[in-house]
Amino acid sequence: MQGMETSPCPNCFARSNLFKVIWNFPKYLFPCILGCLTVIQTLWLCFISSYKDEWAALIVLFLQLWIYINVFRSRTRIRLLTEDLYRISNMLHVYTIQKKKTLKIYIWVYCLFVTFVTVFFEVTLFNTGLIANKQQKLQNSELVPAHLKQHSLAILNCLSTFMSLVGNCFFATLLGYYCFVCCCMKQFFLHFKWKSELLIARQDYQRILEIYREMNETMIMIDNFLNFPIFTSVFNILASLFWYGYSFAFPPNADNVTNMCFSIGFVQYFVLLLITLSPAAAANQAAAMAREFVLSLPGWFPKRYGIIKVHVRRKFMHKTALTLWKIYRIDNSLIISAIGSLISYGILVGTLGECPKFK
């Protein structure tokens, strides 16, 4: 994900240090771009402009850098999680050849959607007055020498391009991966009950408990290392939705192209919000149903009732769920609450902005 890991270097490349660096180049490219963008945006605020929206852009870059560091430190867990999902899939025999093809189609559709929206947003952004306003500030700035202004304009254009490009690619990749993991866990928990009924007929309760233990531990691992990055990403998404929605509803100097740019940004981040919270809420609901089934498992084996009850109470009484930084348990009501908060604050800020006192 975004240079977290690269495929193992082939033997023909591993013999030369230069070829080895070239092979691992994507691993170092993304953090370098993100660090350079943060430094350039900081210098821009210090020497050129100090508008609130550009401070917000710097805060977003710091959040992206913070999320990247957290996810980068967990890159080994990401690989282990993929192996765990593959092992559980083989235990339950969930994904047939047809389902695997369907899953690949969904992944390709998501990648194409993100690519199309990102490119369309970039093209629309450069035809709005937002970039022209920044260029005008740079031209009028007395802190930049006249012979450096042309080079500074080129740096500014690159900054504007890469800032939105890096943000879209980073969040789309991370949240797409989280959506994939949540969909897999949902399918596993739903398929677990059907698999358990077959094992009950064979009087094989140990296999049922083993499969549920694997799924339960995987669910805990997902929440342990992804709860903070997802919490920060959702916070950034909600802030972006508020900014795009408010800019579209109360534009200072807007034309059709600018309104289209704000609309594209709003739709993109709204889709990212849905693919983050909806699959996680569905996975939590399926996990709760599987837990209820396991708690009722002793009743299916009267002769082993005492042994199974002690085993279940000892290991599976704790509720496992996907959360946002161990604070919010993700469910469908959280989506409604988040959207309602955005609307409420938008109306409040819009009302205050219309008052002469606050103007």
Image: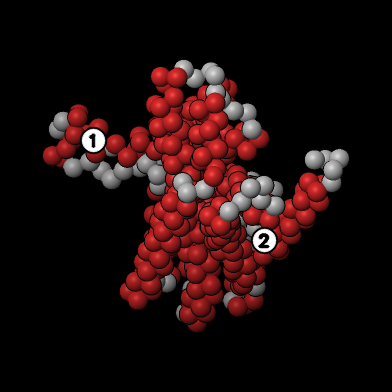
Q: CA distance from mark 2 to mark 1?
A: 43 Å
Residue 212 x %, y %? 53, 64
**Is residue 136 or residue 63 the one in the foreground?**
136
Circle 1 packing at 10 Å, graded few (<14), some (14-19), many (20+), is: few
**Is residue 170 or residue 117 the one in the foreground?**
117
Which tag, 2 or 1, sits closer to the chain's start? 1
Q: Amino acid at mark 2?
A: Ile
Q: Secondary structure at mark 1?
A: helix
Quarter of the image containing the C terminus?
top right
Q: Secondary structure at mark 2?
A: helix
Residue name at image x 39 percent, y 26 percent: 151
Q: Amino acid at mark 1?
A: Ile
On screen, residue 160 above or below 307: above
Residue name at image x 39 percent, y 41 percent: 4
Mark linked to residue 22: 1
Q: Is residue 63 visible in this depiction of the protein?
A: no
Residue name at image x 20 percent, y 29 percent: 17
Residue 49 x %, y %? 59, 28
The residue singled out by tag 2 in the image is 335
**Is residue 199 or residue 333 the one in the foreground?**
333
Residue 327 x %, y %? 69, 48
Position of 58 with respect to 86 (left or right) is right
Q: Which colour scheme appears in the figure?
A: secondary structure
Q: Do the numbered discs 2 and 1 sit on residues whose CB atoms are within 8 Å?
A: no
Circle 2 packing at 10 Å, graded few (<14), some (14-19), many (20+), is: some
Residue at the farthest bottom position: 201
Q: Is residue 98 visible in this depiction of the protein?
A: yes
Position of 263 with respect to 249 (left or right) is left
On screen, residue 244 above or below 152: below
Position of 83 with respect to 234 (left or right) is left
**Is residue 140 or residue 227 the one in the foreground?**
140
